[in-house]
Image: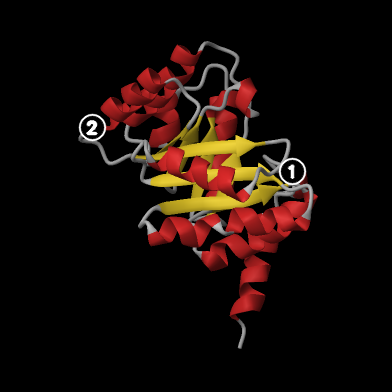
Amino acid sequence: MICIPVWAATTDGAIAGMERAAALADLVELRIDGIPDADMERLLRARPVPVIVTNRSRQEGGAFAGTEEERVGRLCEAAHLGADYLDIESATDPALKARLRESLAGRPGQRIVSWHDFSGTPSRSMLKAKLEECMADGPAIVKIVTHANDPADCLRVLELIPCARRKRQAVIAFCMGQQGRISRIAAPLLGSLIAYASLEPDAASAPGQLTVHQMREIRRLLEER
């Protein structure tokens, strides 16, 4: 599945972004950490395709400036309103992660437990330990993303995909950065569940992100016989 992250400063801007993205993507990532006064009910009512609701703190590379309780509280609100997916960081306080699990009880939304390394890619053993740590939370999907400083970094991260699949765990795994671009192409071919792509070259939500047009063209070329 191709997911387009939607960044906007206002609820109206995010709704317009979702409408544009829906024509090209299977789902959108709604980055509410960039919307100070997001009207969650309006946003989710207006979604034209399934959405991942993400509320990243500044410590995790996002823009949310409030407390952790407030940050996770917005995710819980989205869960109560029927969000399709909720992305919560593995490093989040266990009590707050439990609060989100409780908010999803009896509801269709699914949790994505994520871990990011914006400085580099750790060893193979540490990556596998992070995979196990994320899986211990019992999410629908584990997301592990690192920054590639060398093409070999991509290989270590991509190895997580068959590892997770053998454990029957849905996974998203790839590398950021210029050196990580090849992993964004290879990951879906290996079974990574979601590929993130921007609407335009200047709208990337992470370094090395390809546009949705580039991703679709690459997919077309690979599927040609």
* Vertical relation: 93 (above or below) 163: above
Number of other residues with Cα within 10 Å of mark 2, as a class: few under 14, some 14 to 19, many 20 or more: few
156 above or below 104?
Answer: below
Q: Which colour scheme is used?
A: secondary structure
Residue for point 57% across, 57% down: 24
> Is any part of residue 80 visible from this angle?
yes
Callout 2 amino acid: Ala
Q: What element carries label 2?
A: loop
Relative to 17, does residue 39 appear above or below in the rendering? Answer: above
Left or right of residue 77: residue 12: right
Examine the rendered structure and indicate whether residue 197 appears above or below residue 63. below
Kind of residue indicated by mark 1: Pro
| Most foreground residue, 198 or 150 | 150
Where residue 46 appears, as percent x and y from the top left, is 43, 37
**In the depicted view, which residue is nearer to us: 3 or 139?**
139
Q: Locate residue 179, reporting x and y percent.
A: 78, 53
Q: In this view, does 207 lie to the left or right of 62?
A: right
Q: What secondary structure is marked by label 1?
A: loop
**Position of residue 55 measured from the top left corner of the image (x, y, whole percent):** 52, 27
Q: What residue sits right under mark 1 in the picture?
A: 207
* Closer to us: 42 or 57: 57
Identify which residue is drawn at 41% across, 53% down: 170
**At 50% from the left edge and 22% from the top edge, which residue is drawn?**
38
Distance from the alpha carbon under mark 1 to that under mark 2: 35 Å
**Direction left: furthest residue:** 106
- Farthest bottom residue? 225
Image quarter for residue 78? top left
User: Which of marks 2 and 1 precedes in the sequence?
Assistant: 2
Task: Please identify the residue farthest to the top as the structure is shown.
Answer: 67
Question: Where is mark 2, residue-wise?
Answer: 105
